[in-house]
Image (cartoon, rainbow, N blue to C red):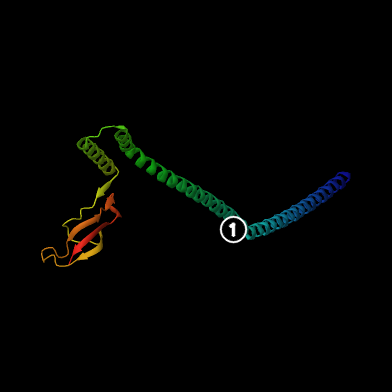
Amino acid sequence: MADKKQEDLNTQMEEENLKAAEAADVQGAASEEAGAETEAEKTSEETEQADGQAQEEAQADPLEQAQQQLEVLKDQFLRSVAEFENYKKRTIKEKAELIQNGGAKTVTAILPVLDDFERALADQSEDPTAIREGMQMIFNKFIKSLEGLGVKKIEALDQDFDTDFHEAVAMVPGMGDDKKGKVIDCLQTGYTMNDKVIRHAKVAVAQ
């Protein structure tokens, strides 16, 4: 009899322990579920915050990009202005040097002719023929120097009158049909330099 009571008591205790374990399992599962819900809510909040921050950054990006582009364009503009100013200064300097060097080249070319004139004036010869020959030599040398600079004489006498090269200062009638419109006299020689007229020939033209 006592053994049966002890057995019933043990069975009752096992049932109570089983119920307590089941209750603990249920409570643990509820806690885990609650924790999972809390973690999910926290993750959702963080996601919402990140999305809001991303939206704010996306809204701020166009302005920042525009400012960056403005700085780049400003820098390029300032560089272009500086390069253009340097180009203008360099061009002006080169032009001035070209003019100066061109004048120096001309003077250098005719200096030997000046030397010949000095020697001719220092000569005490009274022989007209020698003096004339000396002058002719100086003249030829001067013409050669001018040709070296690109200067050429404009042919005018007996040429057809051409307003590109000739300037009519007199019209002479009664010269015949074969002379009509032709240059019959050159009052002042004209010259070209590198094929450009630097002085028109002053001529008389037959009517």
Provide the secondary structure element on which disc 1 rests: helix
- Which residue bears the numbered disc 1? 66
Q: Position of residue 139 (x, y in %)?
A: 25, 41
Q: Residue 183 appears at what percent x and percent y?
A: 18, 60
Left/right placement of residue 38 relative to residue 79 reads right
Where residue 44 appears, as percent x and y from the top left, is 69, 57
How many marks are shown on the rendered structure? 1
Q: In terms of depth relative to the viewer, which is nearer, 156 or 39?
A: 156
Hey, what amino acid is under mark 1? Ala
In the rendered image, the vertical position of residue 176 relative to residue 197, given as above or below: below
**Residue 90 showing in the rendered view:** yes
Classify residue 63 as left or right of residue 89. right
Whether residue 165 is visible to the viewer of this picture, yes or no, is: no
Q: Does 174 sit above or below residue 2?
A: below
Question: Residue 87: horizontal and vertical position, in percent?
Answer: 47, 48
Say few, some or many: other residues with alpha carbon within 10 Å of mark 1 (under 14 / 14 to 19 / 20 or more).
Answer: few
